[in-house]
Amino acid sequence: MAKKAYHGGAFFNAIGNDFATLDKSQEIISADVLDAWFDPSPKVISKLKKFLPFSIKTSPPIQCEGLIKTISKIRNVPEANIIVGGGSSDLMFTFFPHILKEGQNVLILDPTYGEYAHIFEHVTKNKIFRHKLKKEFDFKIDYNDLSEQIKRDKPDLVVLVNPNSPTGQYWERQNVLKLIENFPNTLFIIDETYIDYIDKNLSLEKEAVKIENLAIIKSMSKVYALSGARAGYIVAHGKIIDKVASFIPPWSVSLVAQIAAVEALKDPIYYEKKYKETHKLRQSMISEITKIPSVKVYGSITNFFLIELLDKKLKAESIVQKLRKQKIYLRDCTTMSTQFNNNFIRVAVKDKKTNKIIVDALKKIL
């Protein structure tokens, strides 16, 4: 049987995968995925409500022309350097098979987003090298360590999730650009799904247009609260775009998602406010959980953070299962790193009331 990618999202089993009991969604705390705690922009909701029957029954623009034009204008990158898809995962499963050859070397971070290891192992069938981030340095990237491993292992492609998941750590753009410049024969893929939580101007999208060995993957799910709509894009040099663009199918993004993404991009003020609120909510949660002596909480700049269980008697799997009985879903991070041994949990930030429920439950169990 073919192996499928593993994610969080077990909370939907409690709601009901056939959608017959969606009312249960009000009872479930879905903190095992990194969906935004806030709603999409009111402009998104208003436009979709007004044109919902039309947008459901009508075929969308074939090549997402309007969405690409909007991304180009808002992000200040040429339209010719953008391809879009039904979320970043959709793009990854199309992009990498047309960029990589079987057997080529790929380097990924460890820990990092598990989708990459799955694709390189089971889809493109590459040799995977893991750059193990050090726990004693809070899983932050060290330039010299990473540079030395690239020299040693000579990967054809390097993937950096920045900010990284599940660690919530950000690597400064000057370090990334220096690394890319020093290894011109290596293709670098930077996943910037969470970068807007810090500052959208830190993105390397503009640089990717000019640099031949750089591509940027952006999900619009987490920072625009569009996880259910599914929209994402890649910005890259024309030589990279040319290898992939013809394999993007027509109507790859639904009309609902295209409309939602366009409206979201046009409302930066709303989202900037929500990002600031997210930082306050996260810091409040971390402040409380840090008081628990049996855990270590790692700092983060995103809408999630990482907890290490210091007591060897505590197991992530057991804690996650106990919380599920209380309708609280957190992520056991064991599959996200070869270094994790049933002792790391990732928590997504939610609204103030929900966060208190999560914190209180953790305090009781731990």
Image (tube, rainbow, N blue to C red):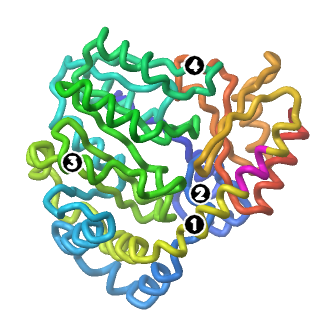
Q: Secondary structure at mark 4?
A: loop
Q: Secondary structure at mark 3?
A: strand
Near mark 3 (Cα within 10 A), the count class, few <14, some 14-19 or many ≥20, is many
N-term mark: 3 or 1: 1
Q: In the picture shown, does residue 24 fall above or below 279?
A: below
- Indicate the position of residue 132 as horizontal and vertical percent values: 49, 18
Q: Are marks 4 and 1 in contact (CB under 8 Å)?
A: no
**Cα–Cα span, label 4 and label 1:** 45 Å
- Indicate the position of residue 58 as horizontal and vertical percent values: 26, 80
**Cα–Cα span, label 3 and label 2:** 39 Å
**Cα–Cα span, label 4 and label 3:** 30 Å
N-term mark: 4 or 3: 4
N-term mark: 2 or 4: 2
Q: Are marks 2 and 1 in contact (CB under 8 Å)?
A: yes
Residue visible at 41% across and 59% down? 220
* Residue range highlighted in magenta: 281-286
Judge by depth and name the residue closer to the eye, 351 or 341: 351
Residue visible at 15% across and 25% down? 101
Question: Which amino acid, mark 1?
Answer: Ala
Question: Which amino acid, mark 3?
Answer: Ala
Judge by depth and name the residue closer to the eye, 318 or 358: 358
- Indicate the position of residue 192 as horizontal and vertical percent values: 41, 47
Q: Give the residue number, with chain letter if any, for mark 4.
A: 134
Near mark 4 (Cα within 10 A), the count class, few <14, some 14-19 or many ≥20, is some
Question: Which amino acid, mark 4?
Answer: Lys
For the stretch drawn in magenta, the main secondary structure is helix
What label sits on residue 16 in the rendered view?
2
Q: Give the residue number, with chain letter if any, for mark 1.
A: 20
Say which quarter of the image contains residue 156: top left
Residue visible at 43% across and 82% down? 48
